């Protein structure tokens, strides 16, 4: 049974939060870390999960769970261009 977009996004959200939980409080991850972790095949197929991983990160930003950063500072989705990192939100 194929995953729906919603199921994939939820799965990637869980993967992002799990990866962050396993790292130091101040650590960040790359969306590719989540894509690789969520990918269930061999080879380079994880690359197809990069955009869904970024979308999942932005959903978590909206929920106040994480921040997306560039050069160590939080950015909005409109500001983000190029590589980004994901870290726990400052609470």
Image (spheres, rainbow, N blue to C red):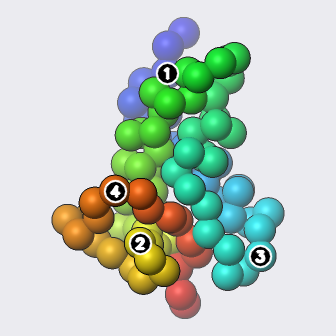
Residue 64 in view (yes/no): no
Quick check: 42 left or right of 68? right
What separation in Å lies between label 3 and label 1 (alpha carbons)?
Answer: 31 Å
What separation in Å lies between label 3 and label 4 (alpha carbons)?
Answer: 25 Å
Q: Residue at x 46, y 39 (%)?
A: 50
What separation in Å lies between label 1 and label 2 (alpha carbons)?
Answer: 31 Å
Tell me the quadrant of the picture where the N terminus can be found. top right
Give the image location of residue 46, x and y in percent: 56, 29
Element at label 1:
loop
Give the image location of residue 69, x and y in percent: 44, 72
Q: Nearer the viewer, residue 6 or 25?
A: 25
Q: Which residue is mark 2?
A: 70
Q: Residue at x 42, y 57 (%)?
A: 83
Categorize mark 2 by other alpha carbons within 10 Å: few (<14), some (14-19), many (20+): some
Task: Please report whichever mark, 1 or 2, sits nearer to the chain's N-terminal start.
Answer: 1
State the mark number for residue 89.
Answer: none
- Tags 4 and 2 touching, CB below 8 Å: yes
- Tags 3 and 4 touching, CB below 8 Å: no
Task: Please report whichever mark, 3 or 4, sits nearer to the chain's N-terminal start.
Answer: 3
Residue 32 in view (yes/no): yes
Q: Is residue 27 above or below residue 31?
A: below
Task: Please report whichever mark, 4 or 1, sits nearer to the chain's N-terminal start.
Answer: 1
- Tags 3 and 1 touching, CB below 8 Å: no
Q: Residue at x 37, y 48 (%)?
A: 55
Q: Which residue is mark 1?
A: 3
Task: Please report whichever mark, 3 or 2, sits nearer to the chain's N-terminal start.
Answer: 3
Closer mark to the observer between disc 4 and disc 1: 4
Q: Is residue 87 above or below residue 1?
A: below
């Amino acid at each position: 049974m194929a995953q729906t977009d919603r199921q994939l996004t939820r799965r990637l959200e869980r993967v992002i939060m799990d990866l962050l939980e396993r790292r130091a409080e101040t650590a960040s991850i790359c969306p590719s870390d989540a894509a690789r972790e969520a990918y269930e095949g061999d080879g380079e197929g994880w690359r197809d999960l990069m955009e869904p991983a970024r979308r999942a990160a932005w959903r978590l930003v909206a929920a106040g769970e994480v921040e997306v950063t560039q050069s160590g500072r939080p950015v909005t989705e409109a500001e983000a261009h190029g590589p980004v990192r994901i870290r726990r939100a400052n609470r």
